[in-house]
Amino acid sequence: MIQHSLKYKDSKHDSQPMILLSWLFQDELLFQAVAMNLANIIMRKDDRFIAFGWCILVRGLMECESTTDQNLVNGIKEKYNALLKILCTSIPHLLCIVRKGSILQDKSELPSRLSVAAADCFLALTEGLTKKPDRLSNRPKSLSSSESNPPVSLLASSVDEKKMNTAYKSSTVLNTGMEYLLWDYLEDLICLVERLLAWSRKSRPLHAKGLEQVLKWLQEIQVHYGGIQDEAGSKILKTRALLLSSCWKHYGMLLHLEDKKFTQQYKELLEQYLSGIQYYTNNYDEGHAESKDGGIETRKFFLNCLCLMLGRFDGKKFEGIVLDYGNQISHVLLSQLHCNDEDVIEGVVCIFKAVIFKTNNSSGSSLTDTNQMDAVVPLLLHLLDERDAAARAVVILMAEYCSLSADGHCLEEVLKRLASGNAIQRRNAFDVISELIHISKDSPHKAYHSTQQVIANHLLVCLEDEETAIREQTPNLLPLIDPSYVLPALVHLVCSSDEKVQPAASEAFIRVLKHHNQKPEVMCMLLDNLSNLSQCLTDAEAGACIGKGSNLDRDRVLRLIPEWSKTVQDWNALIGALLDKMFAEPSNATIVRFLSHINEQLAEAADLVLCRVLLQMKGQKGIDEDFFSRWETRTCTSDDSMRMQQSLFERLCPLLIIRLLPLRVFNNLNSSVMYGHLHNLSVMHEYRDVSGIDDNSVVAFLVNSAFSKFEFEDVRKLAAELCGRIHPQVLLPLVCSQLEHAADSQDILKIKACLFSVCTSLVVRGMESLLHPFILQIWRTIEVILLWPTSDGDEVSKAQHGCIDCLALILCGELQAPESFKDCTSWRSYIVGKKGNSGNATSKLYALRYVIHQLINDKSEHNPGSKLRDENCEPIPVSFRLCLANVLISACQKISDYGKKPLAKTILPCLIDSVEVIMQPEIRAACIQVLFSAVYHLKSAVLPYSCDLFKLSLKFLGNGSEKERMAGAKLMASLMASEDSILETISGGLLEARSLLSDISMTDPSFDIQQVCKKLLACITSA
């Protein structure tokens, strides 16, 4: 019989086993034996073929009344309940087959043929437990014929006495002995529905929604009724049995996976379910408040049935049902949108999607037939005038429709409401747009993508909406839209002076960047927008577009970049794209500004950055000497000039990138891309001419660019500055050698480059460079250069200015940490003062005291630039001493607050005591100028010496050369403009100063001095 059931499945000969079994069942003894052995087969035989045939045969037994002539199956009808009880013992085994029967395909579960047959057999058995005893055929009865006697309430959450009495009376229709059996299998029912849900999730979404609700309901009644004991609540036990049986009678029928006869009765079922929803909506919403919850639960039951039934169909069959019943379904479901129950709303929305939007069709095509929706849209829009459950449901429906429809009319209506003056309409419309964006962000439908620009424009306006909820949620949506539609506008909003929109725009801007933080093209798009904005600002300053860019500040955008940069996980792709863009647009300053805000991230990927930079520098061609000469003399043609400007930017570009890197990138001496073999100290002495350095490293290119004769001045300066970041172990030996060589040949360009590098190194490296042994050799070479004769404005004087700055930085470094020099014997042996002045040998501030000593002494036993003391004690050149005065002035300008007091304490007493006995008037004037700079820059640190300084100013103002008198006037002016504490100290000499100033302002031969004295006199008089 099993083999026959398999062979003739779904044919006209499949009833023969039923006829034979019916004849056997007429004998009681044979019935018991056959039924028991039939039930045991599925548990004894571990054979998939036998199990498959058994499931088909048993399902046929349970459904024989609808497939076979009733006169031929009387034996089965008579023994139906007994047979059902026996066969139900196989339910656990059937469930085991169902659980093991899933096949994983495309990350979704699908049932095998055996598991489908087992599930349908399971359902047939449990359906049998819901049938009445006097009739096997239990066709659903239309509610329209029994409206005065509605079905039992399906509420699981509460049980009162009135409902229990009603349920008890109705439960008498169940056969005694069968009434509790279905409940005993409740756990198995839950497990079966879970498997059916897993199989239907992807292929039948509407059916899956119904299964979700059935599963939820089964779990709820299990929790609510599961703990009741027989003795404690017999009425409740019968109520739960009736409740489960009443619902499962329909659920079981609708859950079959294979049921070819189902299509013959779907119309009657559809009308019954729609009538049931309408009946309970009308009756329980109008005057039945005491049973309103029960009405909702029953409506949920019919909605579940509707989901399960409609979800079984797809393709043309489903479209035919929609064509015939679409308007009726829409009419009934629209009334349910006012329900406050979320399950009802979800069920209605899911059915609407399937009926109107054809989401039950797996083709995934866009919506072209909009007749159903066109009729419903006006009604749905009307529901968006309130903030209630109906509005929430309509939001989902409208968003779904807009995502599928090629006609933009519905979206246009929503956007009109988004711009309306009604806050509720705006919020609901905003919710529609929000839902639309979320469901469409990964959608292939062109309908949505073609409207993104329009949606983006409206959302950008929402950034300044009066409603806080809209304003705060908009930044969450903008990242989900194509950045080309939102980024340019966000950049302008962030840069604008409108404080109302700036916070929301800034938040949206950051979120857009975070959302696309692994997309280099978005970063390049941002740079283009910022570049365009910069050009607009430039044009605005020139008057080309007044009002368009004059109120924009791009720094507001750049200040947000660090916050975004913290969220980037992988910088390699981004950095590569950013560097490529900069190399492609070398004159674009915006890119440099942008990169400066992610310099720490550039440092983390230093090897990648340096390799790209090195590759770019190696690809650059050298500058032709003749061509460069014409560029320097400005005699090249306009075309050549443009080409040279482009070449200038291209050569600056990699240097600017290196400049952005933190100093720590230069600290890795083992980095081959940074240092090559130049970190080897012995190598440094081999290169008196840097053009011989052919090492393929970043440092080699920097050095060559800094010291090259045929290089753009801007490139040479920047390269020299970057050389100052090189580790002192590499830089200082190399620069020391180059500086000596340049001094010997009086190569001013190379001297300036060397000095710039050393100054930068002293600033950025501090004591690490200052204490390096080669600094002393550099000092000696600097002294040689300072001895050169010069005139104002020539190249030598420019080189000497670099020497002065370098010595001043050394003095400042010494003042910052004097203790660091106490063990520097090389400094002590070179810089200590006069022979026999051994007391100074143990003093601190060797370099500073040496400079002061050389300045104030007309003769020195230590010849500048010499390694040994000069026994002849020849006079020190005046020009050299003037340079040292400028060194002290520069030190006063550069010194930090920490070093001001030590500097004042060291300089002022020596100069105050010595200035009057210095022989040369130029040096005396220079010393007074140093004192003036000290008062001006050191502020309160000069307080202990202010009285003596004031006396000196009076003395030199009244006597001396014109330079001395002018220096004295400046010193007095500086003291009089100082802090109150200094003014109090010098107040005793103001009367004398007043008299002196009065005379000088009238009698001094220098007009300039007269004018200065008149101003000082006016200050004293007014005070």
Image: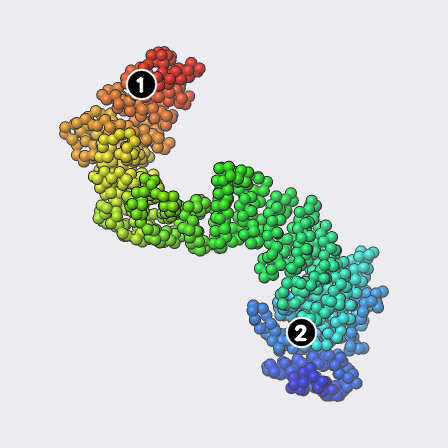
**Is residue 951 shown to the viewer in this render?**
no
The circle on residue 965 is 1
Type of residue at label 2? Leu
Give neighbour class at mark 1: few <14, some 14-19, many 20+ (Cα, 10 Å): many
Residue at the (24%, 49%) spot, across then down: 692
Type of residue at label 1? Arg
* Nearer the camera: disc 2 or disc 1: 1
Q: Which residue is mark 2?
A: 257
Q: Nearer the viewer, residue 453 or 205?
A: 453
Residue at the (63%, 81%) spot, across then down: 51
In this image, 499 relative to 981: left or right? right
Total count of labels:
2
Give percent across and percent down for residue 888: 30, 29
The circle on residue 63 is none
**Is residue 141 shown to the viewer in this render?**
yes
Please determine whether, in this image, residue 946 is positioned above or below residue 76: above
Real-space CA distance between mark 2 and mark 1, rounded to the nearest whole angstrom: 112 Å
Give percent across and percent down for residue 162: 81, 61
Please determine whether, in this image, residue 467 is positioned above or below residue 370: above
Helix or strand or loop: what does disc 2 sit on? loop
Please determine whether, in this image, residue 801 is positioned above or below residue 468: above
Quadrant of the rendered structure where residue 465 is?
top right
Give the color scheme: rainbow, by chain, secondary structure or one colour. Answer: rainbow
Residue at the (40%, 22%) spot, across then down: 977
